[in-house]
Structures are given as C-alpha cells and as structure tokens.
Image: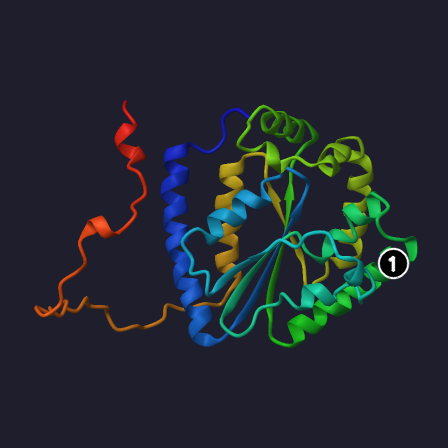
Amino acid sequence: MSGGMARAHYEAELLRLQAELTTMTEWIRASGSRVVVVFEGRDAAGKGGAIKRVAEYLSPRICRIVALPAPTERERTEWYFQRYVAELPSAGELVLFDRSWYNRAGVEHVMGYCTSDEYHRFLAQCPVFEHLLLDDGIIMVKYWFSVSDDEQERRFQSRINDPLRRWKLSKIDLEARQRWSDYSRAKDAMFLHTDTPESPWFVVDAEDKRAARINCIAHLLEQVPYQPVDESRLKLPKRVKDDGYSRPPRNLFTYVPDHAATVTD
C-alpha cells in the first residue's frame, strides 16, 4: 500500500504509546488484575506486527503471548475451550492471544477441521464462556484486523519474495486466498453470535499497518482502567569493592570469535 502514516510520526507516537503500555502493565502487576487481549483477523492483516509492538518493551513476567499450535490428538477429545483456559492470566498478568478460541469459527469451520455440530456448539457456547471470564473479573478486549482482498494479495506476494518472512506463509494461508468469500461469511456469522454488548468486537482497519498499530494500542490503553503506580525512585547503589578477590585470567575462558571486527562498511 502506498502512502499511509508517515514513518517519523509513526515512530514517535509508537514510542510514546509503548511507554504508556509499561505504565499500564505496572498497574496490572500491582493491582493483581487479569487482562486478556484477543487478536483475530484475515491472514496477513497485521496481527503479529501489532502484538510485537505491544509486547516489545514489556516485562515477559507480566506480558505473555499465546500462539497455540494445532491441537494434539488428546486435546481434540477435550472440551473445546479447555486448552485455552489453561493459558488465561493469573493475577498481575496480561495475555495476548495471537489467534484464540475463535479458530473454530474461522479456519476450522471453513477448512472442514471440525464438524457442523462442533461449529454450531461453539457459536452457542462462546458468549457463555466469555461471560464467565468477565464475570470472574477478567478484563477482555477483542480485536479484528480487517484488510482488503487486494492488500492481502500484495502482502502475500511480498512474503513469497522475502526469505526472512517466507516462513509466515503456510499451505492454509495459500488455501485461504481461494476461499475469501467463505472466510467472509464465517466472519459475519461469528460477529452475529459473538459481537455482544458485554464482549464486543473492535475492528481495526489494517490497510495501513502503521496506522493500525497506533490505533490498536491507543484504543487498548483506553480499555484498561489503569492508573500510574506510585513507586519510589530507583537509585543505583555503589558497587562494594573486594580487594581480596582476583578474577581468573581471560585466557582460561573460551570467547566467541570477534566476527564484528570483520564487518566493514
């Protein structure tokens, strides 16, 4: 996509928002809150990039990214939501779901990985499941990243030609290109059943990746009722010297070769 948000404006605002995210997660830790953020949307819509920017400067002890693989044979026999329940936050945690239980309403339904009964049972149970999470005090925010057919194709082509990002394309992603309308119908049905006043979907226009990240993070900060945590100012203490200790000579250790010294302009 040509144009879009200017890089200089994007980088400055992103850094400001990321600093605010650290304030938010300190409140989550100090207050013992539990926060879940669900990221869903079309393939190549920019979910992963947004998640990366949200988590970039956050403590991994507070912020955790969950991107589950395909279920095992054992997990296929469990209650559908069971493996996602195991990933929910404990007190003082923020969990970012890079895709979630909504796999059943999307890829599993469209690709025939679940039965019709399993699909319709999910649509009936999902609002109840989410009501239970909210009723237990979990703060939950759901984002759908929306991208056009043309922009998705452009991003897929870019990934095919980029060896550093080619891993992002799977056979399922390529199959999705042929089932655009099927995924559109599945998304509309999913919203019909799960876009509720209690647990609404927030749609992120993701045609411009930079703007999408800025809009998503700014909105997320508005959804969590955090306050700055009053902490005493940290002060670095002086190092205590021990004149009776001598470190071993460097030649006793095996150092990594200095490859950096061989790199020239």
Foreground: 18 or 113? 113
- Split into 4 quadrants, where in the image is the N terminus? top right
Task: Answer whether residue 201 is visible to the viewer in this image.
Answer: yes
Foreground: 176 or 68? 68
Secondary structure category for the residue under label 1 = helix
* Left or right: residue 135 compared with residue 106: left
Q: Is residue 49 above or below residue 64?
A: above
- Split into 4 quadrants, where in the image is the C terminus? top left
Q: Is residue 108 above or below residue 178?
A: below
Q: Position of residue 142 (x, y in %)?
A: 63, 56
For the view shown, which residue lies furthest in the left direction? 243
Q: Amino acid at mark 1?
A: Glu
* Left or right: residue 104 compared with residue 43: right
Q: Position of residue 256 (x, y in %)?
A: 32, 43
Q: Position of residue 199 (x, y in %)?
A: 68, 63
Q: Is residue 166 above or below residue 49?
A: above
Q: Residue at x 67, y 58 (%)?
A: 200
Q: Is residue 34 above or below residue 196?
A: below
